Image (spheres, rainbow, N blue to C red):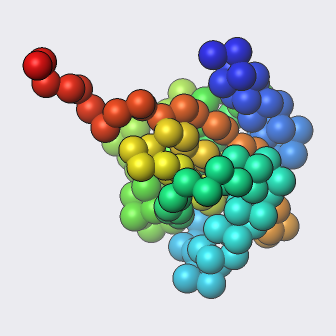
């Protein structure tokens, strides 16, 4: 639990320092080449490479992270499916804590079968680099087990 909390705190600090706050602007969809580039950047990061050394099966998915800002402080973030960014704007059915948001590409990695680890990698599209990584443990089973 301490490790997960540490990763979340690091995520907040890195996003605050690297991205800075700015008002939401229209975002253009990623081309297939850009999606592949973001996946390659995420997989090449040393921490991600280390977590994938187990040889477990993994899958990747491109998506978005909507980051809410209050001044230069991150006050929340929301994982959004790739298809949910319509017309370059975040979904309107989510209650954001501020009107000041940025949208960044995200690579979501599921490790193991059943999933033992989720890795969320937030990327900077323009600089083609990793901004932050969030690590979350998966469930030991795919769901509830029926009584015997």
Image quadrant assignment for residue 43: bottom right
Q: What residue appears at the point 78 percent right and 64 percent down from the top-left corner?
A: 44
Q: Is residue 25 visible?
A: no
Q: Residue furthest front?
A: 148
In this rendered view, identify the residue nearer to me: 47 or 38.
Answer: 47
Residue 131 vertical placement versus 69 (above, below):
below
Q: Position of residue 101 (x, y in %)?
A: 63, 43
**Would residue 81 be found to the left or right of residue 56 on screen?**
left
In this rendered view, identify the residue nearer to me: 80 or 20.
Answer: 80
Q: Residue furthest top?
A: 2
Q: Position of residue 53 (x, y in %)?
A: 70, 54
Q: What residue appears at the point 75 percent right and 56 percent down from the top-left corner?
A: 49
Q: Is residue 86 visible?
A: yes
Q: How many marks?
A: 0
Q: What residue appears at the point 61 percent right and 47 percent down from the top-left corner?
A: 120
Q: Position of residue 33 (x, y in %)?
A: 62, 84
Image quadrant assignment for residue 99: top right
**Would residue 17 be found to the left or right of residue 3 on screen?**
right
**Would residue 96 be found to the left or right of residue 76 on screen?**
left
Q: Residue furthest right?
A: 17
In this rendered view, identify the residue nearer to me: 138 or 107.
Answer: 138
Residue 5 vertical placement versus 53 (above, below):
above
Q: What residue appears at the point 57 percent right and 81 percent down from the top-left corner?
A: 31
**Quarter of the picture holding the N terminus:** top right
**Quarter of the picture holding the C terminus:** top left
Q: Position of residue 108 (x, y in %)?
A: 55, 53
């Amino acid at each position: 639990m301490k490790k997960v909390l540490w990763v979340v705190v690091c995520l907040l600090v890195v996003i605050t320092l690297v991205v800075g706050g700015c008002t939401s602007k229209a975002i253009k969809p990623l081309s297939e080449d850009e999606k592949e580039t973001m996946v390659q950047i995420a997989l090449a990061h040393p921490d991600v490479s280390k977590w994938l050394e187990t040889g477990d099966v993994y899958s990747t998915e491109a998506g978005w992270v909507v980051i809410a800002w209050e001044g230069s402080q991150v006050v929340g973030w929301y994982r959004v499916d790739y298809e949910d960014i319509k017309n370059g704007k975040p979904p309107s059915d989510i209650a954001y804590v501020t009107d000041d948001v940025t949208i960044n590409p995200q690579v979501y990695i599921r490790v193991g079968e059943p999933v033992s680890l989720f890795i969320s990698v937030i990327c900077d599209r323009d600089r083609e680099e990793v901004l932050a990584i969030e690590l979350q443990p998966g469930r030991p089973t795919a769901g509830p087990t029926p009584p015997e």
